[in-house]
């Protein structure tokens, strides 16, 4: 009986030890595709990028907004991972569920919401764009609102001389933000109220044109780079004068703040 009890005790100790080893191993083994990369999620509501970073020793979740850059994850530094249920428990009490990990795509459930993160910022924008508009960016560009109102750069002299107020939109090859794509949305709203909306390719401007414009009014810069920004630039003109100038900047996918300008 004593031997039987000893055997049972030894077996119990072995089972407990094995379970402990498995548990510890489960907490530490994570897909190495996740480590040492910055993962980005584009927030189409505010235009900022969330960023998640993991390495073997720590965690970071950068989630900016209009008011500040801190969030409920700002004080989460360490984690434990259970490979069996694919849950990441953070030291601040939060939890992340891993759904999919590839070399450049991360799908997680965080705060009850499924989110995709990408190592490439542009891929994140493309995904959110397709999800929001149900068409991809190239298909959206084919709406061609800019092409409809496009004029040659030397026509600007006739435009600014008109009695009616006109808007001239300058877009060049430096325009690489989401606003440069969604400018079509703004233009569609504008041309429904006015026919005096024009688009000029900033790359078609030259020093001669800018010098002549500056002679008419010094509100036109002679620096060609001032017309080739990361955002579309608008000049409101009439009777050889510049009434106003500004950039079209959208809040994520929302450009409504530009509709009534």
Image: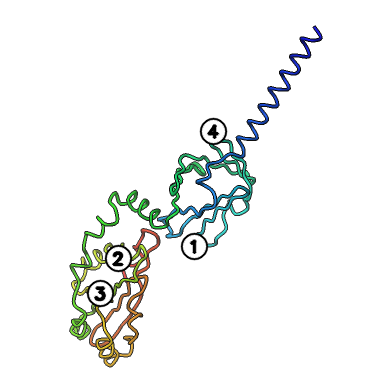
Label 3, label 4: how many angstroms apart (C-alpha)?
Answer: 54 Å
**Which mark is in front, 3 or 2?**
3
Residue at image position (48%, 52%) is 39
For the residues labelled 4 and 1, the Cα–Cα distance comes to 35 Å
Could you tell which of marks 4 and 1 lies nearer the N-terminus?
1
Q: Nearer the viewer, mark 4 or mark 1?
A: 4
Q: In the image, what residue occupies the spot 44% across and 51% down? A: 118
- The residue singled out by tag 4 in the image is 85
Instruction: Determine the CA span between mark 3 and mark 1.
Output: 32 Å
Structural distance between the alpha carbons of marks 3 and 2: 14 Å
Q: Residues within 10 Å of mark 1 (few under 14, many from 20)?
A: few
In primary-sequence order, the first of circles 1 and 2 is 1
- In 3D space, how far apart are the residues under numbered discs 1 and 2 (Cα atoms)? 22 Å
Find numbered disc 2 in the image and state the secondary structure of the residue it sits on: helix
Q: Residue at x 37, y 70 (%)?
A: 230
Q: Earlier in the sequence, mark 4 or mark 2?
A: 4
Residue under pointer 1: 66
Question: Where, quadrant-wise, is the C terminus in this rendering?
Answer: bottom left
């Amino acid at each position: 009986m004593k031997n039987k009890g000893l055997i049972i005790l030894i077996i119990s100790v072995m089972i407990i030890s094995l379970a402990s080893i498995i548990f510890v191993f489960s907490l530490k083994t994570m897909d190495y595709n996740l480590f040492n990369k910055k993962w980005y999620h584009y927030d189409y509501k505010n235009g900022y990028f969330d960023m998640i970073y993991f390495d073997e020793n720590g965690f970071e979740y950068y989630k900016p907004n209009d008011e500040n850059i801190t969030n409920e994850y700002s004080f989460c530094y360490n984690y434990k991972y259970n490979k069996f249920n694919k849950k990441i428990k953070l030291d601040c009490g939060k939890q992340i569920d891993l759904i999919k990990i590839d070399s450049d795509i991360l799908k997680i459930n965080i705060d009850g919401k499924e989110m995709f993160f990408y190592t490439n910022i542009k891929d994140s924008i493309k995904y959110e764009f397709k999800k929001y508009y149900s068409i991809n960016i190239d298909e959206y560009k084919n709406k061609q609102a800019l092409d409809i109102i496009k004029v040659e750069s030397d026509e600007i002299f006739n435009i600014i001389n008109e009695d009616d107020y006109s808007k001239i939109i300058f877009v060049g090859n430096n325009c690489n933000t989401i606003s440069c794509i969604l400018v079509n949305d703004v233009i569609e709203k504008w041309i429904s109220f006015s026919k005096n909306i024009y688009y000029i390719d900033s790359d078609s401007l030259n020093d001669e044109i800018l010098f002549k414009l500056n002679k008419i009014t010094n509100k036109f810069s002679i620096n060609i780079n001032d017309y080739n920004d990361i955002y579309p630039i608008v000049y409101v003109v009439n009777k050889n004068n510049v009434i106003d100038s500004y950039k079209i900047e959208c809040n994520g996918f929302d450009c409504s703040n530009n509709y009534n300008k």
